[in-house]
Amino acid sequence: MEKEEKKNSKTVMFIVLGIFIILIIGAIIWGISSKVESKPKPNPIDVQCKYACDNNQRTGFCFVERKVTDELTATCDELSKNPLYTKYNVGTCPAISCVVKKTQKETDQTCITGLGGKWEFPDEQGKCPQSGIKLVRQVTPSDNPPTSGQICCR
């Protein structure tokens, strides 16, 4: 009988040990999966634009192109004024004027004073020829004077 009791106690011990190992593995897997799922999501476009407005960031609100969807990039100003974009809930910013004044010097000040760069024509790869640093902003039709094909480089 002693052999049978030892055999039963070993069996119970292996079962308890197996359950304990399964619980540990499950806890490890659950911990890893919860860390993967908890990545912070980027702020929605309306929050980004409100931040730019509240902090009086004219360049950020008026001229920085933001990726809204895979198919749409637009400035906060465009999103706030175009009736096609009302679903993005971007409000206007009365504190900032996005109108480019006709009295500006020949070079658009958005690139120089706003972004700390200068207007240049891109090289064959579409990058800044002097520095090779990625383009900061392309010229848009609203730029004054229009310098078609140039990019703002740092």
Image (cartoon, grey):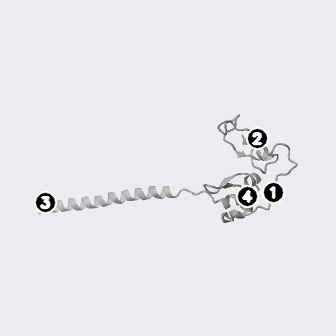
Q: Name the residue under label 4.
A: 78
Q: Nearer the viewer, residue 30 or 62?
A: 62
Q: Mark 2 or mark 1, which is nearer to you?
A: 2
Q: Please state the horizontal and vertical placement of residue 17, each as a whole percent of the image.
A: 29, 58
| Amino acid type shown at disc 3 | Lys
Q: How far, Cα to Cα, is label 1 from label 4?
A: 13 Å
Residue located at (60% from left, 56% from top)? 42
Local secondary structure at mark 4: helix
Q: Pointer 1: what residue?
A: 97
Q: Distance between the residues labelled 2 and 1?
A: 22 Å
* Residue for point 66% across, 63% down: 88
Which residue corresponds to the image point at 78% horizontal and 43% vertical from the top-left?
147
- Which circle's residue, 1 or 4, is located before the other in the chain? 4
Q: Which amino acid does label 4 sit on?
A: Glu
Q: Residue 60 carries which label?
A: none
Which circle's residue, 3 or 2, is located before the other in the chain? 3
Residue 63: x, y in percent?
Answer: 74, 52
Give the CA separation, mark 1 to mark 3: 91 Å
Disc 3/disc 2 C-alpha distance (Å): 90 Å
**Which amino acid type is marked by label 1?**
Ser
On the image, the x and y values in percent for residue 120 come to 74, 38
Mark 2 or mark 1, earlier in chain: 1
Residue at the top extreme of this rendering:
130
Point out which mark residue 119 bears.
2
The quadrant holding residue 80 is bottom right
Q: Of tags 3 and 4, which is closer to the observer?
A: 4
Q: Nearer the viewer, residue 148 or 130?
A: 148
Residue 9 falls left or right of residue 29: left
Q: Which structural element holds mark 2?
A: strand
Query: Compared to 103, does 26 lie above or below?
Result: below
- Where does label 3 land, which residue? 3
Label 1 sits on a secondary structure element that is loop
